[in-house]
Amino acid sequence: MNVEERITELITKMTLEEKVSLCHGATLFKTGAVERLGITAVTMSDGPHGIREELKDDVFEPLGLAEDASTYFCALIALAATWNTELAYEYGNGIGEEAKARGKDILLSPGINIIRTPLCGRNFEYLSEDPYLVSKLVVPMIRGIQEQGTAACVKHFALNNQETNRLQVDVRVSDRALREIYLPGFKAAVEEGQVYAVMGAYNRFRGQHCCHHEYLLKDILKGEWGFDGVVISDWSGTHDTVEAANCGLDIEMGTIAPFEEYYLAKPFLNAIKSGMISEAVLDDKVRRILRLAFRIGKFDQVRPKGSFNTREHQFTSLRIGRESITLLKNEDGLLPLRKEALKTIAVIGDNADHLQGSGGGSSGVKALYEVTPLQGLHNKLGENTEIIFARGYSNDPAKAEELRAEAVRIAAGADAVVIFGGLNHGDDAEDHDRTDLKLPNGQNELIQEVYNVNPKAVVILIGGSPMEMDPWIQDVKGVLLAWYSGMEAGNAIAEVLLGDVNPSGKLPVTFPRRLEDSPAHSIGEYPGDTSVEYKEGIFVGYRYYDKKEILPLFCFGHGLSYTTFQYSDLKVFDGGRNGGANIEVSFNIRNTGSAEGAETVQLYVKSIQPETERPVMELKGFKKVFLEPGETQKVSLTMDPSSFSYYCEEKKAWRMDAGKYELLVGSSSRDIRFTEKIDLKHCSMI
């Protein structure tokens, strides 16, 4: 008997009440169970960045256990800054293994909503402003999670691009922008990643709540994409029994008891008994839930046991931290700092000694440990260097002047100064957006004053969203962006700062100079009281800055290195026979510096004289290449028709137009090393 036959047999043996019990929460993070048939509860956990601590069954309060600390891997935007698909797999594999060891069946991760506004409180939980980069990272992460016998639940489907008014805002967006920008990551998760579960979003889309949206869930997700897994509501994101039942929601979860009063609980049961909803609708939901249970091995005797807090997982966190750190600016070779020249180092800023893992909302992690940047420098420098710490700033205005004066005083006499600023999870957090891009608590003034007394001061920013750096960015010569890079963050930062590790992070999101340069805040709408129209359409992130010829503070894909790379010998091979769009681009990349390092080469496509409006260019390929000094590697990147296509609203299909295109290869979206024109002879609908 195959799995589908076994599922059918189980369904026939279940009462109506038993079937309904599987479709809603019986606690905050568990569904019902049918123990007489061996159907155990499906247990879920938050955990984009590490498995959440255990909570009480009916209220969001910790149980206070000693054994529920986990590995804090990093925020997902830090993973995205690595541009490393292999690390995405390792991240997923590690967190999936930890979930399994903690008895979790579904991990509510990864989050892949597009970063539309730099103010969104959950940007740190997401991957990028670019749908191609999102797609290429989410697939290996899902595979890693699910290989451990844990179901991944990709979220939030769809258009959850702001936290302000997230429970009621109604998003209006064109079909083209929906298909080209906001859905590709989810499509890749389903069709390539074979994800087992999808979570709906809180917001509405064209008047209907996304957790039971007919067009999104029935027509696209389960219809076009053939998704045969489980759709789960965001917690208390369900609003109507009949709509939820008939429009594709399979499991309703919520934030408060009584659980039997949920829309897919007693009201669902009564609606079926009255004939308002067909029992076949219920059976489809139960089939999907049981299918997920079989896929993760809940009915098998042999199932991965999992493990957590292993040295392997901690090393994965360290590797991600190392590769995520992004060198934004390095004039006059200020970085790395030379350890042998450091008799005294002034470490300034609250973020040097601030724990980050537990904040941010549902993504918070009770980490087994967390190495702060200050501790990381102590670990690395030992007793050979005197480290003098000054907090420098505080959210208490009464202390600001005193703290700043102390910081300036110790900076003036130190051999080196490192200022740790940026954001924390009071700024980057679920359920609210930031109000501006400015560094909080007088940090701009602090940085400028410290620079004035010691021009060799280095700034290291922590955070998960773009930040303004005005006016000090014009003066400060060395700037690193360290994101929220996990439990080993302090060690990773120290290694990069002191040159033991060469930074290789690249920005997965554009950093604007001013908030009003951002498309959502310029030609789009934000935040809206009850409705938001995405007037910028497909011109999100770098697509908008390119179109409007706006110079960002730091462009998409930007990230420097302690070494240099030379690109050469570009070749383009048309494998599609006379412009059929199966194109291979190859070139050599050489490490021409004295340090080993990694470069993420990026391939963009530009349509020349397009028949319809297109972005100036779009990311369609990338690869991270690790090179010893003097080493050369050949890089090959392949494009298929999807690399040249756009969504045609008239035909309701993807279209590739014949014509001339330009292929651009570079180190970032604004650092193009060479270009090549090609001529596609054929049009096609994809």
Image (cartoon, helix red, strand yellow):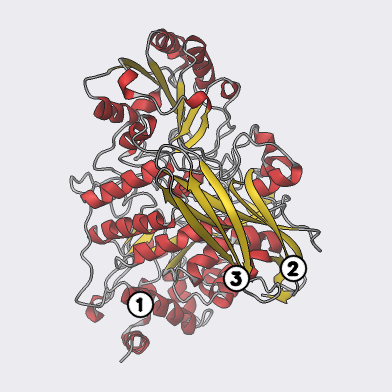
The image's mark for residue 290 is: 1
Question: What x and y, as percent, mark residue 585?
Answer: 59, 62
Asked if marks 2 and 3 touch (Cβ < 8 Å), the reply is no
* Foreground of the two, 274 or 614: 614
Mark nearer the N terminus (2 vs 3)? 3
C-alpha separation, residue under disc 3 versus residue under disc 1: 23 Å
Asked if marks 2 and 1 touch (Cβ < 8 Å), the reply is no
Query: Neighbour class for label 3 at 10 Å: few (<14), some, many (≥20)?
Result: some
Left or right, 488 with respect to 78, comes to: left
Q: Is residue 180 visible?
A: yes
Looking at the image, is mark 2 or mark 3 nearer the viewer? 2
Question: What x and y, as percent, mark residue 379?
Answer: 25, 29
C-alpha separation, residue under disc 2 versus residue under disc 1: 37 Å
Q: Amino acid at mark 2?
A: Glu
Question: What x and y, as percent, mark residue 414?
Answer: 37, 12
The image's mark for residue 649 is: 2
**Quadrant location of residue 100?**
bottom left
* Foreground of the two, 1 or 239: 1
Query: Neighbour class for label 2 at 10 Å: few (<14), some, many (≥20)?
Result: some
- Disc 1 is placed on an element classified as helix
Q: Amino acid at mark 1?
A: Leu
**Relative to 116, does residue 643 appear above or below in the rendering?**
below
Determine which residue is flagged by label 3: 214
Question: Residue at 44% across / 53% down in the picture?
Answer: 84
Mark nearer the N terminus (2 vs 1)? 1
Left or right, 453 with respect to 149, comes to: right
Asked if marks 3 and 1 touch (Cβ < 8 Å), the reply is no
**Quadrant location of residue 525?**
top right
**Relative to 41, does residue 348 appear above or below in the rendering?**
above
Screen quadrant of the N terminus = bottom left
**Relative to 92, does residue 377 appear above or below in the rendering?**
above
